[in-house]
Image (cartoon, helix red, strand yellow):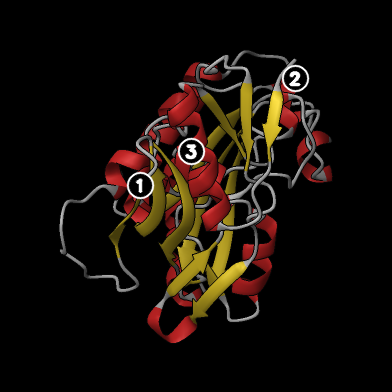
Amino acid sequence: MVETLRPESTIGVLDAVKWAVAEETPLDVIGAGSKAVLGRSVGGECRLDLSALKGIEAYEPNELVLVAKPATLISEIERALRENNQQMAFEPADLGPMLGGAASAGTIGGAIACNITGPRRIKAGAARDNLLGFHAVSGRGENFKSGGRVVKNVTGFDLSKLMAGSYGTLAVMTEIIIKVLPAPEKTRTVLVIWQAGGGHDDDGVAAMTDALTSSHEVTAAAHLPARVAARSAVDYVSGTSSAITAVRVEGPEPSVAYRCNELKSMLGS
């Protein structure tokens, strides 16, 4: 039977890790558990549940910085950012339904630990590129920190790049500092609707390649085979009975309008 430790503070996390070190007991670190199937489980007899460490600790819109506990829901952070017309540029994907879980259950700790990034990665970088710093407890049971609450910070080793994508195996993060950015003024998607009945995967890949390598600053691209498009919640996508290639453009309204028209001409949509 797996024993679960559920600390409610940073000190509690420190005590839990110190106990595990003294007992030579591996800890399986978990937050909301929405990404538990990713990576390789420690398979230990003790689980360190961080679900009580949640909440936004600091948010400075003018400084483009947000500080949160690891179990803070991504959806909670996104709501706070929307109130100030800002966003997490790395656009962490909601993998819950894909992994057999609930939607909107992901946490900022899980996104950083797994380096989860959305389609805007091609422009804004991965989660690791948006992590300014963190506080954590090492495997030796010691508190440490890296980075800080400013965008340009070169103090010490850049451990943020190391922690992102480590799946909770290097340390237990207790505080996460990320940079945020203004949300785009306009967002538009150009759809290429292929002829029904044919296989257009190669055509879709070619269209995405042309769009992504153009000068039109595309921030996302996706190709949906007909069977996938049919399951879309967007009526004019699911109702086409065709494969669809989608290309997203963001920015000031006049620029978006111009780039969308250019992409339509280039892609023949």
User: Dot 1 corresponds to which residue?
Assistant: 142
Counting residues from the start of the chain, the first of labels 3 and 2 encountered is 3
Q: Is residue 166 left or right of residue 190?
A: left
Secondary element type, mark 2? helix
Residue sitting at 21 percent across and 68 percent down?
153
Q: Nearer the viewer, mark 3 or mark 2?
A: 3
Amino acid type assigned to the residue bearing label 3 in the image: Val
Q: Residue furthest front?
A: 22
- Quarter of the image with the N terminus in it: top right
Check if mark 2's residue and mark 1's residue have beta carbons within 8 Å: no
Q: Crowdedness of circle 2 by 10 Å Cα count: few (<14), some, many (20+)? A: few
105 shown above or below 82? above
Of pointers 1 and 3, the one earlier in the residue sequence: 3
**Whole-number angstrom distance, CA of label 2 to CA of label 1:** 51 Å
Q: Is residue 69 above or below residue 169?
A: below
For the residues bearing labels 3 and 2, Cβ distance under 8 angstroms: no
Q: Read off the residue under disc 2.
A: 227
Q: Is label 1 in contact with label 3 (beta carbons under 8 Å)?
A: no
* Residue 250: percent from left, percent from top: 48, 63
Q: Is residue 14 above or below residue 139?
A: below
Q: Give amino acid for label 1.
A: Glu
Q: Nearer the viewer, mark 2 or mark 1?
A: 1
Q: Amino acid at mark 2?
A: Arg
- Position of 138 with respect to 101 (left or right) is left
* Residue placed under numbered mark 3 in the picture: 17
Residue displayed at 52% across by 46% down: 15
